Each structure stands twice: as C-alpha cells, then as structure tokens.
Image (cartoon, helix red, strand yellow):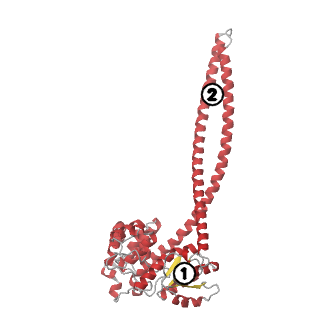
Amino acid sequence: MGTHLQLWRGGHSEVPPNLRLPQPPADLPNLPGLTVPALTAPVPVPASPAALKPHALKRRVRIWEINTNLHCSVIGTCLSAAELRRVLVKLKIAGIETADEHELHMLGVLLANRPQEGGKLLQKTLDRRHEVTLNQFAKARDDAAIGTLWKKAVSSGDIPGAYWAVLTHPDASDKMVQKAFGDVHMLSHLMGATNCADLQRMHQLEDELATLEAKLERQQRQLRDGFIERDGKIARLSAMLAEKVQGDVARRPEDEAAEAAALKDTIADLNDRLSRETARRERLEQRLANFESSDAARRRAETERDSIREELEAMERQVAVLFDGDNREAVPQVDLGGATILYVGGRANQLPRFKTLVEQAGGAFIHHDGGVEDAAALLPGFVGRADVTLFPVDCISHNAMNQAKRVCQQLNKPFVPLRTSSLACLLSVLPSLSRAAEVLEAG
C-alpha cells in the first residue's frame, strides 16, 4: 500500500510515462513571491510517510498533496477553460485575460502545487464546482463502494466530478486512483477516434444529401407536369360548365335540374381535389425550402473549410520559404539562450529547416529518428545532452514516443509533444521555449 501511495499520492520516482508537469509561460505569472521553477527542477517529495498519507487522517486530500504528475489530468478534466480563467483572474495575474487555453492549463497545473499562491483557490473552486458528486462519494468507505460510484459516473459521462472525488477521497487506495487515472487517459484516445468517426459520418451524410437532392428534383418535375395537366382539365371543365349554364332554353326543366346537380357534384369534387393538390404542393414546397436551406449551409461549410485549408497550406509554404536559406528577418523575436533542443522522429526533409530555425533563434539542434536508423539505445544519451525534448505525435512510433517520455522522466528532463511535424507547429512553440530559457537564465 505504501508503494502505491508514493506513486499516486505523493511520490516522484515512478510515474506513468504519459504524465509530466508542464511549464507555464514565463511572462504570465505576476503573483507576489511566485517563482517559476526551472525546466529541470525536481518535484519536492514529502519527507515522512505521514506526509504521503493525508487521507489516513480521514479527511479529503488537498490538491497540493496529490502527486504533481496527476495535476495535469485534474486541471484538464475537472475544470473548464472558462472556470480556470476566472480563478486566475482572481489571482490578479497580468495578461491572463488574453492568454490562450494551453497557457491557462500550464499555469493552473503549476499553481496546483502552491497552496499559498493559488492552490487553495483551486481547491475551493473544484470543491464548489463538484459539491454534489463529492457528497455522493463521501458515503463510500472502501474501494468497492468507490469503484461502484466511479463505474456509474463513467457510464453516464459524469467524469469531472467523479474524478476529483476519487483522487481526493481519504479511503481511496492507490489502486483505485490508478484505475480512475487510466480510464480518464483512455477516454482522451477515444475522443480522437470519435472525431474520425464524425468525419466519416459527415461524408456519408453528404452522399445522402446528393441522393435526396436528385430525388427532389425528379419530384419537382413530376409536380410541375401534374400542375399543368390539372390546370388544363380545370380550363376544359370550366368551358363545359359555361356552355351548360347558358344551356338550351328549350330543354325540359327536369333535365336542366339533373344536369345542374351533376355539375355541382363535379365542381365540388374538383374543388376537393384542388384543395388536396394545393396542400400537397405546399408540403413539397416546404420540403424543398428545407433541402435548399440544408444545401446552402453545407455549401457555406465546404467553402469555409476549403478556404481554411488553402490558408493553412499557403501559410505552410510561406513559412518554408521564409526559413530556407539565411533569412534571419523571418525568425520570430525569440532567444533560446543557447539551449539544446532534441527533436525525436519527424520527417527527414524538414530537419534542415528545423535546424536553421533553432540555430537562428539562439539554440542548438540535435535529432534522433526514434529508432528507424539511429539505435534506440542511443536515445538516453541524446536526452542527456538536451535541455528540452520535442517529438511530433503524428510522425513517431508509439514505442519511440513512450521511450522518449520515459527517458525524459528518468533524467528529469522536460519534453513537449507537438501536434504535427510541420514547420509551423515548431514555430508556434518557440516563444514558450524562449520564455522558459529566460526563466532558466534568470534563476
């Protein structure tokens, strides 16, 4: 039990390979006495077993007592970006109103381990936000009861409150905490798969819409032909009726009465048919209007999507041209301060541009291909030489990514997963790396 407590509630030596305390932007924190830790600073470890087991006192665990490797999942799962921003605004952090969601998340994770500089306010906000769920979990006294409530929350999709309740429950074992963390981690993968399924469904709906549009066009053509035929019949019958009304004055009154009754029946029947046709036409016109509205919305969405795609491709080409050759004017105003950047994986044709970009920003660039040609056993040596390790999640094997994370954690080195292997993506993280370098130099 003690080993698990050290791992999930207060320890530091063995952490899941996908957890890492992120570093906040150096220009955001503006709290009295707040010092942003260096990228390689170790996480403090409590000195006594009692410090590792606050739940032994039968009170809920505070957020700063939770292992810092779990703070990322707590902040990202249990608070929305808007709620986190309101907390940071209360702390009077300069520039927080314009910070993006990633910067908010990084700063929230940092402050979670600082009770006097924001941790207590985060604790209060989380407790108030999930008060109902916390009260439900408070009735549980062992892992079996806690696990039952957790499974129910996962099934119903009520993850944020239940996750906070499990991680802070005084009677939750580390096995239970590890189970909850694993479920939350896998749900993040499921969200990615769901996005792919939604895209496939969109294409399927586009095909169905095209089929419905063709069917509607056929129905409209048939309806127009029917209207023409109906109008012709009405005109002919009206002419016949006029002739009969004028009639032959010599006809017998009883014959005229019979013909008039027959004509009235015919007119009533025609009026009834006309009403039905009119109602049918109105329904079809409404359906047509609905289809036209849906089609217009689809065309607008496609136009916007194509425009965004073209803009992104154009930006990528411009960025590539800007950083080909000696073009220092195109480098963002960042200074890596001589930091060594290790890039694991990626595409070979991009590496010269990456090297130029990092060197022109005042850093050193080294590369390991993740085990394609470079031996995987050499990766620890590369990580040891680097100040920061980067790897694109779309162009690296799962094994290589896990090894890079594990080695970084073993050597207490920071790492940053990149969303894509593009030059634009690397360019977007340079300011954060520059701010981190400034913090290192100032410290």
**Badge 1 element:** helix
Image coordinates of residue 271 in percent, x first then y, are 60, 28
| Residue 125 horizontal side relative to residue 222, left or right | left
Kind of residue sitting beneath label 1: Gln
Disc 1 packing (10 Å; few <14; some 14–19; many ≥20): many
Vertical arrangement, residue 377 with respect to residue 24, above or below: below
Q: What is the CA distance from the residue labelled 2 to the residue labelled 1?
A: 86 Å
Neighbourhood count class around disc 2 (C-alpha, 10 Å): few under 14, some 14–19, many 20 upward: some
- Is residue 58 found left or right of 273 in the rendered image? left
Residue 360's disc is 1
Q: Quadrant of residue 140?
A: bottom left
Pointer 2 residue: 270
Q: Is residue 188 above or below residue 2?
A: above
Nearer to the camera, 28 or 179:
28
Quarter of the image where one finds residue 195: bottom right
Q: Dot 2 lies on which element?
A: helix
